[in-house]
Amino acid sequence: MNSKYERLPNQVREKINQLEKENDMKLSTLQKILVSIEGPVVTTLDILYGDLNVFILDQHMEKADKSVAEKLDINEGDEIDLREVILHKHGRPLVYGFSYIPKDRCSNTVIEKLLSEDHTTGRILLEHEIETITKIEKIYLEEPDEKLQNLFHTPGKMLARDYIVIHKKNIVLWSKEACPLSYYNE
C-alpha cells in the first residue's frame, strides 16, 4: 500500500478557488455545488425546492454566427436552437439559462420537444437517456444586464457559469446559467 499523500487534481475546484481569490469572497457550499454540478442545475434545484417550472423567455432557430459556431465546433451558418429560460418555483426566479443547441446533432424528436414543450434541456437528455459528458468552461461573476436585473429584481452581481455538453465526441449544447450572487447562501 502506498501511503504517500497525493492531491487529486480538480479543474472545477481550481476555477472556484480562483473566483473566490480574485473577488476576495467565499461561496457557500450550495453555491459551489450549483456551479460545479455536471450538467444543468435543474435536478439539484428540484431536490431542494420540489417541482420546478420552466418559463421560456425566447426560443427560435437561427443560423450560427462565427462566435456561436466556435462555441459549438460547427460551421458558421449551421442551424441552431437558441433557448433562453428561467427556472422558477411559484413565480420566484431561481436560475436563468441561455443555450445554443446545434440542430444537426439532435434527433428530430429532441428538436420537437425543445420547440414544443416547456422542458429543460437537462430533463430532455434524461428522458431520452442520452449519455453525455459535461465540461465546465468558466465560472465567474458578472454585472447583470437590464433583463437579468428585471427577472431577479436586483442590480447585484450574478454568479454564472458556462459549460458544454458533449455526446459521442460532439458538442450538443453550449449553456450559460446565472443567478444573483445573493442566492443560495444558506
Image (cartoon, helix red, strand yellow):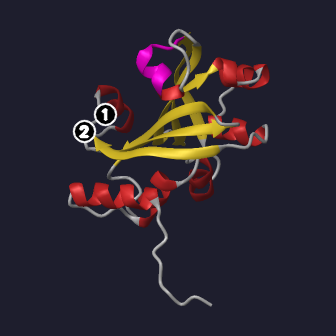
Side (left or right) of 68 relative to 18: right
Q: In which quadrant of the rendered image does the C terminus lie? A: bottom left
Residue at 57% of width from left, 58% of height from top? Answer: 48
The residue where tag 2 is placed is 155
Can residue 120 be spotted in the picture?
no
User: What's drawn in magenta, residue-wise?
Assistant: 63-70
Q: In which quadrant of the rendered image does the N terminus lie? A: bottom right
Identify which amino acid the numbered label 2 is placed on.
Answer: Pro
Residue 135: x and y in percent read 53, 45
Side (left or right) of 104 relative to 9: right
Q: Which mark is residue 149?
A: 1
Identify which amino acid the numbered label 1 is placed on.
Answer: Gln
Side (left or right) of 108 relative to 115: right
Q: Is residue 63 above or below residue 12?
A: above
Q: Is residue 56 above or below residue 180?
A: above
Can residue 167 be spotted in the picture?
yes
Residue at 78% of width from left, 23% of height from top? Answer: 109
Residue 105: x and y in percent read 68, 24
User: Are there few (<14), some (14-19), or many (20+) residues within 10 Å of tag 2?
Assistant: some
Within the magenta stretch, is there residue 69? yes
